[in-house]
Image: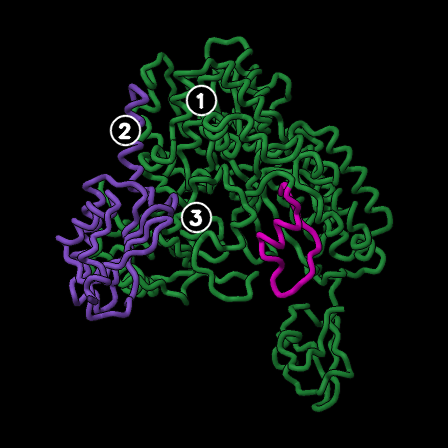
Amino acid sequence: MKSIQELEQIKQRTLQEVNLRKDRKGTRVVVGMATCGIAAGARPVLLAFVEEVQKRNLQDITVTQTGCVGVCRLEPIVEVYKPGEEKVTYVKVTPEKAKRIVAEHIVNGQVVTEYTIGAAEK
Amino acid sequence: MKLYRSHVLVCGGTGCHSSGSAGIIDAFQAELKKHNLEDEIKLVSTGCFGLCAVGPVVVVYPEGAFYSGIKAEDVPRIVEEHLLKGRIVNDLLYHDHAKAEDVVSTLDEVEFYKKQKRMALRNCGVINPEKIEEYIAFDGYKALARVLTEMTPMDVINEIKASGLRGRGGAGFPTGLKWEFARKAPGDKKYVCCNADEGDPGAFMDRSLLEGDPHSILEAMAIAGYAIGSDQGYIYVRAEYPIAVKRLTIAIEQAKELGLLGKNIFGTDFSFDIELRLGAGAFVCGEETALMRSIEGKRGEPTPRPPFPAVKGVFAKPTLLNNVETYANIPQIILNGAEWFSQVGTEKSKGTKVFALGGKINNTGLVEVPMGTTLREIIYDIGGGIPNGKKFKAAQTGGPSGGCIPAEHLDTPIDYDSLAKIGSMMGSGGLIVMDEDNCMVDIARFFLDFTVDESCGKCPPCRIGTKRMLELLDKITSGNGEEGDIEKLEELGNNIKASALCGLGQTAPNPVLSTIMYFRDEYEAHIKEKRCPAGVCRNLLRYVISSDLCRGCGLCTKVCPVSAISGERKAPHIIDPDKCIKCGACAEKCPFHAITKG
């Protein structure tokens, strides 16, 4: 070890990996993964979220799953909880939609209205 | 480095290891592979979580779901339900003794952790101890970097002095002062040693620290090396701690690979190396002078002090020797400042103390509390109280060197000075809880038996004196005690304390003296009435059948291995005390609870 910068680099590289165990604040992305969700293709959606979060090196974001949300016909369903904001429910999500949700909603704070449950039910 | 959406932490400390955590890790591996989840879920073997009583323990993040008492058969369900479908498996979660509503789902909600303050144990059960990167991610080696680049050795010593940290090995000597002595001692070569020879029966704080966070010890030793002007460290660890030895070995290798140990650390001219020395498990080698002789490869025997190790230690060079837990606090103090540390604790005892809770207590395990926490809080709030609704009788701190604390002192704040005042000592942190079924004379005999075995034999007060004390206790517990025996024990004990060569002998009479101080009536019952109030000492035990309760069913006559019970059917039976071997089988079997110890 020759410098403190080197130590800091190792820290940053690993931090994202262990952050999960440290604090559970920040944005939560919850994917419905009951039988209905999985059958509708929730797994690739979940993976797309994880991949996107990693690619953009986003901190304080957890991607997790939940059971059946209830509206099985609209699966895969993804809920995004941002601290201090109301939860946003996206329906019929695909890996492509997932990428847009990360870019527009999670990073830039703009809800992708056309994918939300409100839009689907109109 | 890959991002995982979920982490499964399996406790890999010795406690959970022996209740089968290795098999659980294998099972998780197989199940994750089966469901193709290997790239999404990270499996981590960690150090001790502290709740050894309900091991093996598994924690799943990000939810922080706390599973306890997991068997390999449960793993497929956790993987399928929780990890695949996101449904926490409620019936496998930890159940709190203290709570009315049954299930506690996350780690933060567990009563056991609420009153604790994990400073020394901050990384135990959080990081993978076999990966240096995870330690670094939690600010590991940052304190060393700061010390080497921003502080002078005297700055470091002053910071430690200001923090008020005292030695966690038991005696409580101010750590900063010790460092200063070692720095000021003249000598071209100096050594930094770590005492990891944890020998007290029932103590496992140091082991858990070494297993759960080995790098914090290495970092602290390097800081100490810089502070006193040393380039070589030794960790003296017992060979009976195979997991600790393995993780330390891995940690030293990794630190060397990254250049955090070795030559010119952080590009400065400071170099430091650490070697392991394995002890063969002699209790006396935990005594500092004996430990240093053992490091040198000689027979582990104490030598008179002075000269103190700071002047003449390993290989006759100035040596700094601290306990594992003392070191574990050092990086934190450097990073957060002396003031941060000294805010925790009492006036003269700063910071926290780790205790290994054992004996008659619900939550056997490892706890860390601020100094000044009362024994009652530790035993009832954190420890979950005494099993089976029994009554608390005493707590033993400090192992074979410490003493007993009776119920009337339950509200004493635990720190070095108040424990010494009531005739016990902080010790390294073993805390054994005893209930009404424990005989205090027998407990004293047990600890003395241990020290007699472990006495190195060099000085007569310890070699002969403790032996004579043990003989007296044997005499009392076997029913042959005479008037005057208690006084003899006291006189002998006080003389040994005053005259023995090292800490082992000087403290060996403590368990006896403190039990006499608080439970003299029990000693007297053994001697005068030939009776053991707790019903432990066999020779003083008598089983009797109550003629009112006995229905003459005859079950007891069938289980008695020596045919000591006789009587007509449907009439009260009697036990022949001459034949009875006091095995207690009859009392257990009796459906009417008619047989009691008297």
Amino acid found under the numbered disc labelled 3: Thr
Q: Is residue B213 above or below residue A79?
A: above
Calculate the distance from the C-alpha at mark 3 to the C-alpha at mark 2: 33 Å
On the image, the x and y values in percent for residue B474 come to: 72, 51
> Which mark, by number, is residue B250?
none
Q: Which residue does the image show at 56% across and 48% down from the upper left? A: B115
Span shown in magenta: B373-400
Amino acid found under the numbered disc labelled 1: Ile
| Residue of label 2 | A9
Is-magenta flag for residue B389? yes
Is-magenta flag for residue B285? no
Calculate the distance from the C-alpha at mark 1 to the C-alpha at mark 2: 21 Å
Does residue B43 show up?
no
Q: Which residue does the image show at 42% across and 25% down from the upper left? A: B143
Q: Quadrant of the N terminus of chain A?
A: top left
| Residue of label 3 | B14
On the image, the x and y values in percent for residue B256 come to: 31, 26
Closer to the observer: label 3 or label 2?
2
For the colour purple, the matching chain is A
Q: Quadrant of the C terminus of chain A?
A: bottom left
